[in-house]
Image: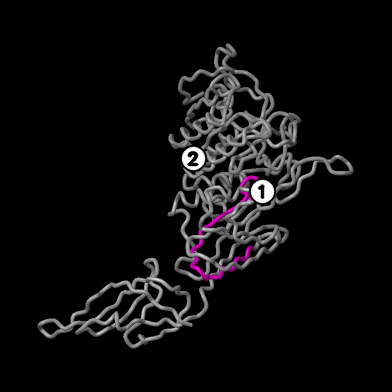
């Protein structure tokens, strides 16, 4: 395989997956010009642990790879809980570093959720026939994103496995390798796309509908199509990913600014997907007594959503806990237009999150034993945030403290947390000024005054002081 460094391959599986993505020679992969970084995550044959997966993703991200394939899967019930969490966080961190993770859905022909294919923000790939129907061996379910060919593929193998250097392979691992090649090809052609935009584009737009139009549990969004991905418009602006836990919001202040810090309202747009991107969270600045109004609207009339408000004390991954103590307010279930109102009891950065409904796990209905799932695969929303500050008050301006002997006051400015809230000229300054949104406490007051120097000319100076402002109704 072009670009492969020497690395022992116990059974040829990794070489075949890499070949589906980027083989050169007598058989071409989907993106033969893409270099391959081989990373071995199996300590011995068939032994892959969450720890080795995490280390592999960290290495790939450090090497600035844009796509990684984890060509193995297992039933979710067999994966250790701590391992699931660790790998999930590694996938999220990798996406933030520009790396998309591609995984196979598995080869058991079942609808049971698999690991790591059921994690958020992975591209989970199944196998389809030339007619677009699901291959019988390919697993299925709501966590499936894409399908592509995975039966009887001629792929390169180490000479120790086959003297000709090629062998036939069947399985969703090779489908995942092919999709990884598609991601690499589209990413190289469209370098301006951020990883989260490329993930969204490949998952939703670089596809052809399979036998069932739209999303379904057998084929996901459809058959991967590189041509469609190259021609598709850039996905609509979405909130930066990963943003479904407080951990990621705190990781980058530049990517996740605090909303309502210097404004009374804001509207943000995002998308959530059951299982794949279960919630979007954002930071909101509130002072004690502020009233926050949250209104959420799905772009589709049938979209169901939930909205929540979280405490400044929210832990890194509280939003995944079944009964967190830091949840302050929610909309009590999923509705089409969830709304809530919340009065802050403390000052600090709060968190607002929008949740997608859970998928109904695949199973049998009560009558005919038919495989069923429910819930839309992709929910776009608009979130409106409005902050009504504490009730109108009258500010008692301590003019005596602000005047200096020999000076003539020209203006007063009051700042909260470094942000100018009010500025008065001399003509506007009175002992009491009506305003909204101030709390009792210490604020920085900047005032300008004109002073006489020895030449009896007036010199403007800026003097800063701190004083306690008393608020009276």
Q: Which residue is mark 2?
A: 188
Tell me the residue at 59%/31% (across/down): 177
Look at the picture and state if 36 lies above or below 156.
below
Residue that protrudes farthest toward the left in the picture: 455
Residue 154: image location, x then y, percent: 63, 22
Where residue 410 sits, quadrant-wise, is: bottom left
Look at the picture and state if 324 lies above or below 94.
below
Q: Is residue 283 magenta?
A: yes
Tell me the residue at 73%/29% (across/down): 108
Tell me the residue at 46%/65% (across/down): 261
Q: Is residue 412 magenta?
A: no
Residue sitting nearer the eye, 132 or 320: 320
Look at the picture and state if 251 lies above or below 99.
below
Residue 77: image location, x then y, percent: 68, 34
Q: Are marks 1 and 2 in contact (CB under 8 Å)?
A: no
| Label drawn at residue 274 | 1
Where residue 333 sits, quadrant-wise, is: bottom right
Distance in Å between CA atoms under marks 1 and 2:
29 Å
Classify mark 1: residues with Cα within 10 Å, few (<14), some (14-19) or many (20+): many
Q: Which residues are magenta?
A: 273-296
Q: Determine the secondary structure under disc 1.
A: loop
Residue sitting nearer the eye, 467 or 229: 467
Q: Compare marks 1 and 2 and give the one earlier in the sequence.
A: 2
Q: How is the image coloured?
A: one colour
């Amino acid at each position: 395989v072009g670009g492969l460094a020497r690395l022992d391959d116990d059974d040829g599986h990794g070489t075949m997956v890499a070949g589906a993505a980027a083989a050169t020679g007598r058989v071409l992969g989907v993106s033969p010009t893409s270099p391959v970084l081989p990373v071995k995550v199996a300590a011995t044959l068939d032994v892959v642990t969450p720890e080795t997966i995490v280390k592999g993703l960290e290495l790939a991200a450090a090497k600035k790879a844009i796509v990684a394939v984890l060509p193995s899967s297992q039933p979710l019930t067999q994966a250790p809980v701590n391992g699931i969490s660790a790998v999930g966080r590694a996938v999220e961190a990798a996406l933030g570093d520009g790396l998309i993770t591609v995984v196979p859905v598995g080869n058991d022909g079942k609808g049971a959720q698999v690991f790591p294919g059921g994690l958020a923000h992975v591209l989970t790939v199944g196998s389809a026939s030339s007619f677009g129907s699901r291959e019988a061996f390919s697993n299925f379910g709501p966590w499936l994103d894409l399908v592509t060919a995975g039966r009887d593929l001629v792929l390169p193998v180490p000479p120790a496995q086959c003297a000709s250097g090629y062998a036939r392979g069947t399985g969703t691992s090779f489908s995942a390798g092919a999709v990884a090649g598609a991601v690499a090809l589209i990413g190289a052609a469209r370098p301006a796309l951020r990883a989260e935009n490329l993930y969204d584009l490949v998952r939703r737009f670089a596809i052809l509908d399979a036998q069932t139009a739209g999303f379904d549990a057998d084929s996901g969004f459809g058959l991967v199509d590189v041509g469609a991905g190259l021609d598709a418009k850039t996905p609509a602006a979405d909130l930066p990913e990963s943003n479904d836990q407080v951990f990621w919001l705190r990781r980058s202040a530049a990517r996740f600014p605090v909303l309502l810090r210097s404004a009374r309202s804001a509207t943000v747009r995002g998308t959530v997907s059951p299982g794949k991107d279960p919630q979007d969270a954002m930071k909101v600045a509130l002072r004690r007594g502020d009233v926050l109004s949250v209104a959420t609207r799905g772009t589709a009339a049938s979209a169901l959503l939930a909205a929540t408000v979280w405490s400044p004390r929210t832990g890194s991954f509280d939003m995944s806990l079944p009964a967190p103590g830091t949840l302050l307010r929610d909309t009590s279930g999923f509705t089409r237009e969830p709304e809530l109102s919340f009065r802050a009891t403390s000052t600090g950065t709060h968190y607002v999150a929008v949740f997608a409904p859970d998928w109904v796990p695949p199973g049998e209905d009560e009558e005919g034993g038919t495989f069923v799932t429910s819930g839309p695969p992709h929910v776009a929303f608009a979130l409106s945030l409005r902050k009504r500050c504490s009730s109108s008050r009258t500010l008692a301006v301590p003019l005596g403290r602000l005047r200096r002997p020999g000076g003539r006051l020209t203006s007063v400015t009051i700042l909260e947390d470094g942000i100018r809230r009010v500025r008065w000229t001399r003509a506007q300054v009175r002992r009491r000024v009506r305003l909204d949104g101030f709390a009792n406490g210490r604020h920085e007051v900047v005032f300008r005054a004109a002073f006489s120097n020895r030449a009896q000319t007036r010199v403007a100076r800026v003097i800063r002081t701190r004083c306690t402002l008393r608020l009276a109704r």
